Amino acid sequence: MARLRLVFSGSGGQGVITAAIVFAEAAVIHENLTAVQSQSYGPEARGGATRSDVIISDKDIHFPKVTQPNVLVCLTQEAYNKFYPIIRPGGLLLTDTRFVETARKVDARQRELPMYQTVMDQVGKPIVFNICMLGAVIGLTGVIKPASVVKVLETRIPGAFLEMNQKALELGVGLAESLN
Amino acid sequence: MEEPTTRFVQGNEACVEAALYAGLEFFAGYPITPSTEVAEHLAIRLPQAGGRFIQMEDEIASICAIVGASLTGHKVMTATSGPGFSLMQEGLGYAVMAEIPCVIVNVQRGGPSTGNPTHVSQGDVFQARWGTHGDHAIVAMTASNHQDLFDVTVEAFNIAETFRTPVILLFDEVIGHMREKLVIPPAGKIPLVERLRTSVKGGVDYHPYLPREDGRLPMSDFGGEHRYNVTGLFHDMWGFPSNNPQVVHGLLRHLVDKIQNNANRMARYKEYYLKDARTILVSYGSSARSALHVVKNRRARGERLGLLELQTLWPFPEHIVREKCETAQNVVVVEMNMGQVLQLVKQAVDDPDKVFLANRVDGGLITPTDIRNILRLIQGKGV
């Protein structure tokens, strides 16, 4: 497989870092891939534009940071404004229609999905917005299976919330498929 | 034998797992970024494993607590970062002088002072060596990935017990915080060194500082069967203070020799493509990841580039560095400080003028591009 470099960005509390960890863990533990996850710490990670980097490959990964992502996810306008210039030409830019108004000036596949709205309509709880986003990323890239993410969620999330997360993941995958 | 366990964890958590694997029984610390997760995870995991975790009022108390706990017969550790490591220097010197096994983790951040708490640095290499006063030897080790970090942490406990010495684990923010795969080996896979206890029976005179023929000093759990003295002053075989020149001379030589004479045994390193390398990168910790990235990419294009990754920083493995770099035209030290290991490499090689520095000190992890730019300059290709 080609090395996939992803940047998940948004604001503190949206769960972008958790989503990145779940994604990378699923790749390593359940798909036998190599993955490295890192994130910004400190004042910039609290409010403002928070960011987590994930690299996935079937080979060793040495330099652990992402300078030019193939996949850039922006869940707020501020994150979009800050990070859209770093996307790798020909990459994938995923934004949420409710939070981000795109300027359409990048050389990338731009995908704007109503992830937040879909979660609010069908689940009614904003906390699984990040997992819906993860479903969309998986649907658009096909890099890992949704079932692998579910296996990780089972170890990290109290049983009572599992179904809600699974639903959100499926909604995300479905939104992505509607574009394909 | 049980199966290995595969986890996806931060470097700080890998350190915790390794410490538990090595038999850690007592941790005292004061949480500080970027080492906090070591304390956070041990606060949960150590009591589950039957050990004790204490959050102390500061780093001075933390190191004193682990030194005391070690004397009573337990494997101990503390974890901190630059400012806390500064406060620990007095206690560290006491552990050196009184020969008390302990492991001190320093997850490096930018300094001096409170510096750049959430960003990476490798500026404490010489603080680990000479941060505490007086003539002494010290052991400091590091790693660039979680599997090596696990092994090096277990080794730190083994060296601490074998040589009755503090061992410093000099990690950095990038390694501490990033997540990657860790395979925890089954119990028994990595040999562990347990405390060497005296065979002297209770009620019979026990000399805490009387070496056996092999130079090792059997310990007696403090507060247990034997009464003896422990001090930071120069001391005789009873542990009582002495300024007798012979005693002072003998003890200082012993403290230095027991580490320096075993430098080869403690030297851990990895080498990549060194045999025919014209340019050798020397690096350690997270910088070594960037260096390896460059080396592998350039090798694929046929460029004769190699990497010597150091895992033992103190005692500095100068013979190994000299030998490995002998035939290289250029040596480039890749590190995130103003040239600390650079000085050591310059001293180690025959021609110091062939040694260059590729560094970064702005809080960002040194990138492959940073290194490539230095290589261009050295190779006369301009910027």
Image (tube, coloured by chain):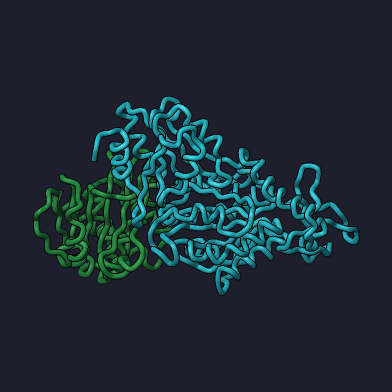
Residue A72 visible? The answer is: yes
Q: Quadrant of the N terminus of chain B?
A: top right
Q: Which color is chain A depicted in?
A: green
- Residue at 54% in and 38% down: B318
| Towards the viewer: B305 or B148 | B305
- Residue A138: x %, y % from top left: 26, 51
- Residue at 51% in and 58% down: B106
Give the quarter of the image for residue B257: top right
Q: Which color is chain B depicted in?
A: cyan
Asked if B372 appears above or below B218 in the picture, the reply is above
Q: Is residue B23 left or right of residue B152?
A: right
- Which residue, as the protein is rendered here, is positioned at the far front? B245
**Count of marks placed on residues:** 0
Residue A149 visible? The answer is: no
- Which residue, as the protein is rendered here, is positioned at the far left? A104
Asked if B21 appears above or below A3 in the picture, the reply is below
Asked if B42 appears above or below B287 in the picture, the reply is below
- Residue at 59% in and 59% down: B132
- Residue A107: x %, y % from top left: 12, 48
Q: Is residue A108 left or right of residue B310?
A: left
| Towards the viewer: A79 or B306 | B306
| Towards the viewer: A87 or B29 | B29
- Residue B56: x %, y % from top left: 58, 72
- Residue A108: x %, y % from top left: 14, 49
Give the quarter of the image for residue A131: bottom left
